[in-house]
Amino acid sequence: MRAVPLIALSMMASPAGAEVVAAGDHGFEVQHSVNLVVPQAQAFAAFGQVGQWWDSQHTYSGDSKRMSLQMRAGGCFCEPLDGGGGIEHMRVTFIQPGERIVLTGSLGPLLYEATTGVMDVKVERIAGGSRVTMNYRAAGFAKGGAAAMAPLVDQVLGEQMKRFRVFAAAAPKPDTLKP
């Protein structure tokens, strides 16, 4: 029963466009884009609710509901861990509410390499809704070469964007969200 509404909601937005833009020994760039039939402000607000749409299989705690993204300059994309630990996945370095957020940091296994990354998320108004484009660039020294990691990162971020698309289509409008 629950699958029917999710299938209907997923049909309300076009599929994610994805690609490994570039990859080399010391860095890579991946990009994903989804079109939504929701206003720009609603899409941007939904992106900030990362704990509602990120896949728990791609967390350190095993529970995506623990993840949070503070939508302000200096804000943390963080995840508390049992026993008082935690992880800072990324840090907000630029935000233009409703339009763009830039985060810096290394996602997943890149954290343990000598790499750094920049995630640039742009939300633009298009006819009938909005387009959300996530661009992630990582550079530095990664064992085995960054080019080998690019398809894996691309796959994981692609899965997240598909989950985001479904969530954003069903998320409440920003004026109904509680602070």
Image (cartoon, rainbow, N blue to C red):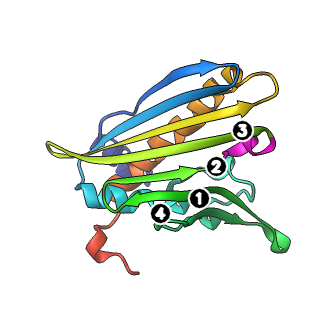
Q: Of the residues under marks 1 and 4, which one precedes in the sequence?
A: 4
Q: Which residue lies under the disc numbered 3? A: 115
Q: What mark, if any, has residue 83 been given in the picture?
A: none
Residue for point 51% across, 57% down: 93
Where in the figure is residue 23, as x and y percent of width and height?
60, 20
Residue for point 55% across, 43% down: 118
- Image depth: mark 4 or mark 2 in front: 2
Q: Which residue lies under the disc numbered 4? A: 49
> What separation in Å lies between label 2 and label 1 (alpha carbons)?
6 Å
Q: Which residue lies under the disc numbered 2? A: 105
Residue for point 61% across, 42% down: 117
Q: Of the residues under marks 2 and 1, which one precedes in the sequence?
A: 1
Label 1, secondary structure: give it. Answer: strand
Residue type marked 4: Gln
Residue type marked 2: Gly
Residue type marked 3: Thr
> What separation in Å lies between label 1 and label 3 (alpha carbons)?
15 Å
Please give the range of residues in magenta.
Answer: 105-112
Of the 4 image quadrants, the one containing the C terminus is bottom left
Q: Is residue 175 above or below residue 57?
A: below
44 sits to left or right of 137: left
